[in-house]
Each structure stands twice: as C-alpha cells, then as structure tokens.
Amino acid sequence: MPTLSAITLYPIKSCAGLSLEEATLTPLGVMTAQIYDREWMVVDYNGMCLTQREHPRMALIKPALKGTTLEVQAPGMLRLEIPLGLPDPQTAPTLTTKVWDDTVLAYDCDALTAEWFTKAIGVPCRLARFHANAERPVSTQWTNGVQVTTMFSDGYPVLVVGSASLDDLNQKLLAAGRQAIPMNRFRPNLVIDGIEAFEEDYAESFQIGEVVLKPVKPCPRCPMPAIDQATGTYGPDPMDIMQSYRAKPEVEGALCFGMNSILTAGEDQRVRVGQEIEVTLAF
C-alpha cells in the first residue's frame, strides 16, 4: 500500500523547508502551527520576488518553530525571530509584491528583518508576508474551472512527488557517472512511497484519510534542482539527463518532475508520515 513518507513545509519561498511528522492540509496548502506554505517571500525594493534561481544562498536560510515565533538562521548570522501572530490588517505597513505574473498585497516586515535578509543573501531586500486580505487565484486552465487560491508558491498549493521517481532519475545519473541527488532538490510538500516511478503523473487523486488531493499540472522545472541545498551552491545539473525523458508536450515541452495538486476534500484534516494513501489512476 502506498504511504506518505515525507511532509515538508516551506514557510519562506525559496528558503529551506521544515520537515514535519504531521501537518494540516488546507486549500492553501500544507500548514502547521498556523504557518502556511510559502506564507513569506523575500522581495527586492521593487517588490519582485527573489528566488534561489538567482540567489542560491537562500537555500542556507533555515526556519524553525520556536514558541510564538519563526526562528531563521543562516551561516555567520545571529538568529532572527519573526512573530507568528498576524499584523493588524488595518494599520500594519504593506507593500505590493510581484510573483511571476501576479501582483499580491503583502505585509512589509520591519527594517531589522530587512537588514538581516539583506546580509544573509547579499543583495538589498525585504521580507514580505501574505496579507490577510489578499487572494491569489491559480490558473483555472489546469483545474478544470475549479476556483483555487494559493499564497507565494510558484503556482499551486501542494507539490506531490513519488520517491520512486527520484530513484529512477538517480539510477540514470549514476549510470552516466554522476552523483545521486536528494529529494530536497525538487522541494515537494508531500512524498509518496510505494508507487511506480512517475505514477503520480497519471493519478486522478491521492486520498490520505479524509484528505483528497487532485493532481492538476505537471511541475515544470527551472535550474533550481542543480542547487545543492546543503551548500547553497550550484552542483551537477540533472536537467540534461531529464531532457531525455521528462519533456512534457502538454506544458510546451518543459522538463517536469512532480505534480502540482489541489485539495478537493478533507479541508483542515491532519495527515502524518507513514499514513496509507489510496492512489486512483486517471485511466
């Protein structure tokens, strides 16, 4: 029987994730302790999102839960604590952010936080938090008209990958005289054991207890899988190996790994590592 083998929440877009034993599944994605996936985002002074694509050192910014704060660490830096309580939406300072083609209202975190991230990443930047009154719809082209929103993810609330898919890629890398790479290069929220390689591509749904996730779009890959998440530097790039078998014509030939998914049932239900998953294929 397929099982849920890993849960990862990424509080700050493009920074390191939180590995969890259990979490709540919401329409906005994975959540724990009232922290949502990609609830925060680092932006430049024009509000444009910063990512590991251009700033691989962001991989070294590591969050941790500490009471009522989100604690972040980076090499050579003092720890920073970010309050988890939401700011007052009527009085808190805001800024307009840009996530790819979307313009999103956000809270503007304070100057001390901006200074910390500027030093950690090496470019002038600020930390933004998704505003309580903001809404960011996903493309209904892939959801069959279902209205879904997300925070600062690239496009969809939940990314699901089968562990056998990474095993398959690593076998090809090793056969080519290359090093195997870990799953964190692909930054999934949920990892499934016990299904065939890339079986997630053909799933109609994943049911975990009362939770039902529907995969809606293959996840196109940028150069980020080439970034070693432990060192924050570019390493061997798996994209040339993926080029031979992971190009998807339905997304204009993009190289894809993992499935962007939406919640269709079981809102605010808890899931846990080791839980059985019922996988229904779309044929």
Image: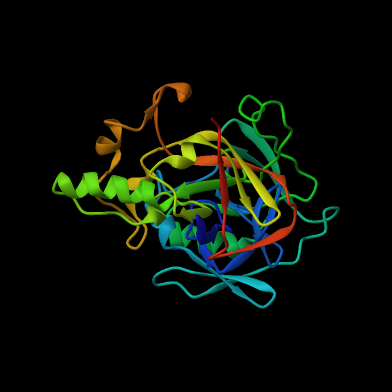
From where the camera sits, is residue 46 visible? no
Q: Position of residue 270 (x, y in %)?
A: 68, 62
Which residue corresponds to the image point at 64% horizontal and 29% vertical from the top-left?
A: 139
Q: Position of residue 110 (x, y in %)?
A: 66, 61
Does 87 sit left or right of 205 as displayed?
Answer: right
Of residue 247 and residue 269, the one placed in the foreground of this image is 269
Q: Position of residue 44 (x, y in %)?
A: 54, 46
Q: Residue furthest right?
A: 90
Of residue 229 and residue 252, the one placed in the foreground of this image is 252
Label tally: 0
Query: For residue 276, what is the image quadrant?
Result: bottom right
From where the camera sits, is residue 79 visible? yes
Of residue 19 and residue 59, the one placed in the foreground of this image is 19
Does 132 sit left or right of 53 as displayed?
Answer: right
Q: Residue furthest bottom?
A: 67
Query: For residue 154, what is the image quadrant?
Result: top right
- Coloration mode: rainbow
Which residue corresponds to the image point at 50% horizontal and 56% vertical from the top-left?
A: 1
Of residue 96 and residue 221, the one placed in the foreground of this image is 221
Query: For residue 198, what is the image quadrant?
Result: top left
Does 276 sit left or right of 73 as displayed?
Answer: right
Q: Position of residue 203 (x, y in %)?
A: 53, 38
Which residue corresponds to the image point at 71% horizontal and 54% vertical from the top-left?
A: 210
